[in-house]
């Protein structure tokens, strides 16, 4: 998509943040529904984030960047 529309690259950061929040909320809801979620697990989910370079690169990131909680259960 970026090759066809290079201007979309300016919107990558916002899209990553939005999808990380959405994914974090879904993960928390699913864990609460099917298992007892610990505060440690919740904190880890909330602090997980990836940089633009990690998402767009051709490798899978080993460790996510730690950011303030993006999930609101």
Image (tube, helix red, strand yellow):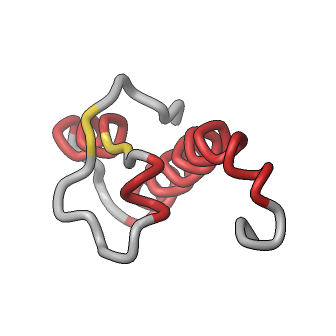
Q: Quadrant of residue 51?
A: top left
- At x 77% / y 52%, what residue is drawn? 8
Q: Identify the residue shown where x is 18% and y is 64%.
A: 62
- Relative placement, left or right, of 39 versus 46 is left
Tell me how many marks there are.
0
In this rendering, would 71 be left or right of 45?
right
Give the image location of residue 33, x and y in percent: 48, 59
Name which quarter of the figure residue 34 lies in.
bottom left
User: Which residue is more in the foreground, 4 or 69?
Assistant: 4
Q: Residue furthest top?
A: 68
Residue 59 versus residue 67 in the image, above or below: below
| Position of residue 73 in the picture relative to residue 67 (left or right) | right
Where residue 67 sits: x, y (%)? 33, 29
Q: Nearer the viewer, residue 20 or 9?
A: 9
The image position of residue 17, as x and y in percent, is 56, 39
Residue at 68% x, 50% y: name it. 9
What percent of the width, then of the height, locates residue 25? 54, 45
Question: Considering the image in quadrants, where does the N terminus appear?
Answer: bottom right
Q: Of residues 10 and 27, which is closer to you in this image?
A: 10
């Amino acid at each position: 998509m970026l090759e066809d529309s290079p201007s979309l690259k300016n919107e990558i950061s916002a899209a990553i943040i939005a999808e990380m929040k959405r994914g974090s909320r879904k993960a928390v809801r699913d864990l609460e529904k099917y298992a007892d979620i610990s505060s440690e697990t919740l904190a880890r989910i909330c602090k997980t984030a990836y940089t633009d370079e990690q998402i767009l690169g051709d490798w899978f990131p080993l460790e996510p960047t730690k950011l303030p909680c993006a999930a609101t259960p």
